[in-house]
């Protein structure tokens, strides 16, 4: 079923170069091809003096969830003109951007307006003490921006295969780097695409969040996985994949290393999950052949999503890589992608109104089987 993605070159021919921005934030360049000699040596000459800082995380005693308070993000960059895009390469020293070099393939850097950040300033001495629950604490962690192309108008689905391979390596690199931080509980790699999603920068990019505590969705999944293991001895996510492969009704495509399927209880009008056949905890654990196929499979899924609604050129979407926790309960996690769109019909969005937003009680206006049929129908 679907396209066979075997035969893609496995070994990534690119290179990684690590530099620093003017305020000390790391910037990492990922080139499609290796070159001899020094690269990306252009310095960041902006007069940046204040490093990004961590906000707070506060515990909601009613739900048992940590909520991030990041008031410094209120005035972050919002829908700048193409001429003022901070993700473009710096081609004019008089108009510097977040990327000092005048050319790049893929680049990652610490967000200037982070949701989570290392403690680059002294911890506030008197964090609020709540009447119930744990004490508030700094929102320690990491917030990376990963820029997929120097072309302001590019789309991930249309990038060359070599560039998609480099993007995968960037995801792997940042996952490994942040997972090594003992203050990080989980690393989430994601992309928001389309103004309907709320994207504030139109330049093609994604993000990486390294959380100081397990996020609510992961905590719920881990609890279900723990119960499943106690009852069956199996891994919940692996067993779900096997069940979908066996039934086949909602399978969208199947490669040598990955299978994409619409979940049985899909919540969104367009939703598909992608999982490796091998049990791996995170992107950093993927082997070369798996990374190579992943780039091709991911782009094919994006192209099918873009064809899902007739007459719609670009379907807004969110894609996120759910990875195993970095320390505790790591054996219960398993790498998988959730890709979804809130566009239910051309010109019509699914709004999270009373039932979904107020009660978390989801109502889907279509069926998972219809979603899967359509995603197979629009295959390349």
Image (cartoon, helix red, strand yellow):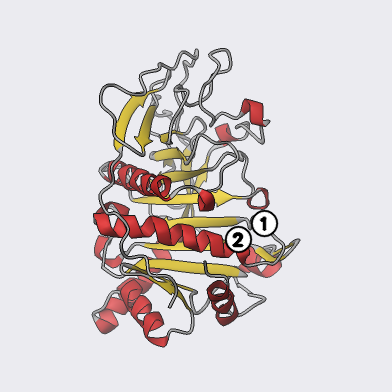
Q: Are marks 1 and 2 in contact (CB under 8 Å)?
A: yes
Residue 106's place in the image compared with 175, above or below, is above
From the viewer's perspective, is residue 186 above or below residue 147? below
- What's the mark number on residue 306? 2
Q: Quadrant of residue 101?
A: top left
Name the one closer to the observer, 293 or 224.
Answer: 293
Q: Residues within 10 Å of mark 2 (few under 14, many from 20)?
A: many
23 or 130, which is in the foreground? Answer: 23
| Res. 141 image quadrant | top left
Residue sitting at 46 percent across and 13 percent down? 45
First in residue order: circle 1 vs circle 2: 2
- Report x, y in % for residue 58: 48, 46
Q: Which residue is found at the position 57% from the left and 35% from the top? A: 73
Identify the disc placed on residue 313: 1
| Residue 84 location, quadrant | top right
Drawn side of residue 356 relative to residue 249, left or right = right
Q: Position of residue 129 (x, y in %)?
A: 46, 41
């Amino acid at each position: 079923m679907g396209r066979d993605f075997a035969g893609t070159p496995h070994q990534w021919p690119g290179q990684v170069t690590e530099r620093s921005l003017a305020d000390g934030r790391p910037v990492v360049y990922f080139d499609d091809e290796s070159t001899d000699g020094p690269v990306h040596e252009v310095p960041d000459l902006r007069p940046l003096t204040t490093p990004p800082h961590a906000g707070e995380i506060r515990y909601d005693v009613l739900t048992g969830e940590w909520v991030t308070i990041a008031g410094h993000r209120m005035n972050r960059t919002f829908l700048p003109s193409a001429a003022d895009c901070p993700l473009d390469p710096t081609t004019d020293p008089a108009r510097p951007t977040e990327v000092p070099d005048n050319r790049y393939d893929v680049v990652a850097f610490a967000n200037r307006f982070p949701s989570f950040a290392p403690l680059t300033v002294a911890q506030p001495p008197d964090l609020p003490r709540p009447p119930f629950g744990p004490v508030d604490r700094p929102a320690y962690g990491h917030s990376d921006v990963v820029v997929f192309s120097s072309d302001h108008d590019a789309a991930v689905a249309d990038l060359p295969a070599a560039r998609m391979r480099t993007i995968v390596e960037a995801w792997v690199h940042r996952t490994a780097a942040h997972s090594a931080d003992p203050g990080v509980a989980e690393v989430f790699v994601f992309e928001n695409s389309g103004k309907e999603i709320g994207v504030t920068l139109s330049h093609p990019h994604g993000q990486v969040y390294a959380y100081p505590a397990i996020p609510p969705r992961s905590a719920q999944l881990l609890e279900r996985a723990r119960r499943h293991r106690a009852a069956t001895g199996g891994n919940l996510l692996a067993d779900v994949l096997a069940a979908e492969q066996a039934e086949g009704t909602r399978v969208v495509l199947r490669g040598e290393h990955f299978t994409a399927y619409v979940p049985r209880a899909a919540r969104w009008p367009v939703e598909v999950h992608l999982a490796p056949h091998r049990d791996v905890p995170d992107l950093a654990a993927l082997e070369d052949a798996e990374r190579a196929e992943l780039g091709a499979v991911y782009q094919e899924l994006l192209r099918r999503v873009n064809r899902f609604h007739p007459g719609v050129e670009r379907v807004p979407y969110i894609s996120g890589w759910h990875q195993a926790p970095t320390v505790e309960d790591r054996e219960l996690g398993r790498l998988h992608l959730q890709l979804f769109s809130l566009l239910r019909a051309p010109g019509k969005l699914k709004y999270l109104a009373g039932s979904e937003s107020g009660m978390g009680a989801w109502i889907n206006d279509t069926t998972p089987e219809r979603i899967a049929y359509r995603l197979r129908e629009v295959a390349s």
